[in-house]
Image (spheres, grey):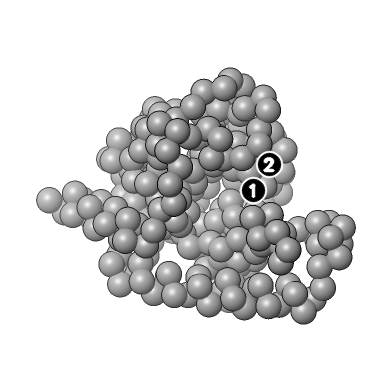
Amino acid sequence: MLVSPPRPTRADSDVSHVATTARRFHDRRDAGHQLAQRLDSLRGQNPIILGLTRGGVPVAAEVAHTLGAPLDVIVVRKLGVPTHRELAFGAVGEDGVEFINTALVQRLDISDEAIAKVRTFETDELHRRLSLYRDVLPALDLKGRTAIVVDDGLATGATARVACRVANAHGAARVVLAVPVASREALGEMDAYADEIVSVVIPLDFSAVGESYDDFDQCDDAQVIDLLRESADARWS
């Protein structure tokens, strides 16, 4: 089991390239194109782009294409409150890396039994997806590399925390979290997990990630696999 503690808050960790506007994105591809423009300065660092499955992968694929960088995935599963599954009380990622929002668990009085049940279900699903994706693309070596962790948005930050910790545990020299849209609250808690945070926009009145997209349809396994294959083919062509 790889368990990486949160990075200590550092003076040089920062949130860069942000705007507090009501900008919208047509879809995840458009969001990735706009995000890539904010990441162009990292092109010379030979980065690896890591899309959070599943919705972050179309965004990451566009970033990888624009920067001419390899694409990989990080599989993370949100741990949802049993009575309100869209609300995350934590997340679990590859190699047993986990984050639990203990304050929320206590406030909602979520039992140990309920936590264990959700964790088991989501871990099983994580392993299913990981096996599926790794049949298409073996994990890229992050040791000594700049890892750009990409999602389609940052709401609570639970899955992003775990994804950054996975990248760190796998040896990334530098971890950059990049999202098209983010809530102020989540951004304020992420500097202990990433060396740099890049966001295209921080809405003044954030309600949900999907509110910033015209098209926010679900991304399925087939789409993730197609994007991984396309990226791998482009690198070797």
Check the picture and name the quadrant holding the N terminus.
Answer: bottom right
Residue 111 in the image: state x and y as whole percent: 82, 73
Q: Nearer the viewer, residue 104 or 8?
A: 104
Compared to 170, does 13 lie above or below?
above
Q: Residue at x 18, y 54 (%)?
A: 233
Q: Which residue corresponds to the image point at 58% horizontal and 20% vertical from the top-left?
A: 21
Q: Does residue 208 appear to the left or right of 34 in the view shown? A: right
Q: Residue at x 81, y 68 (%)?
A: 110
Residue 156 coordinates in the image, percent (x, y): 67, 47
The amino acid at mark 1 is Gly
SS class, disc 2:
helix
Is 139 placed above or below 193 here? below
Query: Residue 59 falls in which quadrant of the image?
Result: top left
- Residue 33 point in image, percent of width and height: 36, 32
Do the numbered discs 2 and 1 sit on residues whose CB atoms are within 8 Å?
yes
Q: Between 90 and 197, which is closer to the camera in this rendering?
A: 90
Residue 103 appears in view? yes
Disc 2 marks a residue whose amino acid type is Ala
For numbered disc 1, what is the local secondary structure? loop
Instruction: Indicate left or right for 212 with 112 as reference.
Output: left
> Any mark on residue 157, and which?
1
Within 10 angstroms of label 1, few (less than 14), some, or many (20 or more) residues? Answer: many
Q: Is residue 36 left or right of residue 18?
A: left
Between the residue at mark 2 and the residue at mark 1, the CA separation in whole angstroms equals 5 Å
Residue that numbered label 2 is attached to: 186
